[in-house]
Amino acid sequence: YSNGFCHWPVCAWKKPDGSFQPSQTNFTSLADPTSVGSGLTALRTLMHEAGHAAHFANIEQPSPLFSQERAPTSVAYAETQSMFLDSLVSDASWRAKYAKTADGEVIPWDILEEEIRCTHPYQVFPLRAMLSVPYFEKALYEMAEEDVTPENIQNLADEIETKIQGGLGPRPLLSVPHIISDEASCYYHGYVLAEMAVHQTREWFLSKYGFIVDNPKVGSILCEHYWHFGNSEGFLDLVNRLTGRELNGKSWTDHLSISVEEKVRKEKEDYENAIHKTKEEETDIDLQMNLRFVDGDLTISDSKSKGSFLAACKEFETYIRKRVGITASSL
C-alpha cells in the first residue's frame, strides 16, 4: 500500500460480563533507509498512525460500534489523536531525547535552530493549503450540474488556490487524493478542525504542566478525556471539557504568530532541559500489549516471544539492516 495506514480487524470494547476485549490493530509507515530525508516523513507518519492505534485501543464502551473508524466516528475527533502524537516529532525536546545516532549522539542544536529559522516564518502556508481543500470541495459541490466539466473544475481549483493561498500552490488541489476518493471526499475539513484541536490541547498541557514529552500525566488524561468515549460523545464537547473553552483557531494562530527569535529561544530551552533532565531512564517500555513486526506473511519479531518491547524493536532493526545492506554507523 502506497501510504501509511491504520485499521482494526478487532475493535476494543467492554463486554456485557464486564471483561475488556482488546483491539487488534495493524498500522504501518514507509521509508527507504538508504534515502536521506525519508526517515523524517516516515517517522511522522508512524507516530500519526500510532496515535490512531493508541486511541482506538483505549476506547471503553459497551459495543464495538463505538470504537470503529466509520460514521458516526468524527474525522476531526480521530485525527486529533493521531496529529497530537505526530506533533511531538517537531518538538526540540522530543528530538533531544529520541533523535540520536546509532552511537547515541544527540541531534545537534544548530541543526534544529537552522530548521526553525528556515521554516517557521512560512508555517502559515501549510495552514492556507489545508484550508483550500475543504473550500474547494464546498465550491465544487455547490456548482450547477451543467457546469461540472473538467475545464470548469480545473479553473475552480486555480481560483480557490489563488484566493486562499495567494497563488497557485506547489501541491495542486486536484492532486489531493481525498477529493477524488469516494470514501474520503468532503471530510478534509476534519483535518483543519483536528489541527485546531491539537494546538488547543497542546496549549492546555503546556500551560498546566510546562511540558508534554515524557510527561506521565499526558497519556492518562488523553485516555480519560478523549479516548475512552469513542464516538459516544461529540468531538466539540470533548475538546471543550478538557481545555475549558470551545474549539477555535486562536491557539493555532498564536503559535504561528510567535517571532522566530522567541521560537528559537523557547525550543532551545526545551532542548537543553530534555538533555539535562535527571529523570532515571527506564530499562524497557511496557505498553501492556503484544507488538508484532511483520512483512506480509513473515513475522520478523514478536515482543511476546522476545520478552520485551525494545528487544523486538532491536530484532526488527537488525532485520532492516541486513535487508538493505547497511551498517549501524550509516543509520
Image: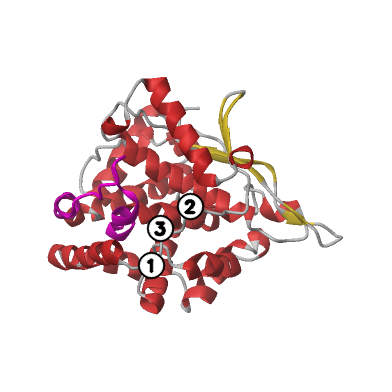
Look at label 2 and name its amino acid.
Ser
Q: Which quarter of the picture shows residue 208?
A: bottom left
Give the CA separation, mark 1 to mark 3.
Answer: 31 Å
Residue 330 location, x and y as percent?
27, 31
Badge 3 amino acid: Glu
The residue segment tinted magenta is 90-118
Q: Which residue is tagged 1?
A: 279
Amino acid type at mark 1: Lys
Front label number (2 vs 1): 1
Q: Name the residue under label 2.
A: 82
Assess disc 3: are there few (<14), some (14-19) or many (≥20) residues with their C-alpha within 10 Å of its C-alpha: many
Residue, x 64% and y 66% (percent of image)? 233
Quadrant containing the C terminus in the rendered view: top left
- Is residue 101 shown in magenta? yes
Q: Do the residues labelled 2 and 3 touch (CB within 8 Å)?
A: no
Residue 141 screen position, x and y as percent: 48, 43
Q: In this view, does 41 lie to the left or right of 112?
A: right
Q: Identify the residue shown where x is 32% and y is 67%.
A: 277
Q: Disc 3 marks which residue?
A: 195
Q: What element carries label 3?
A: helix
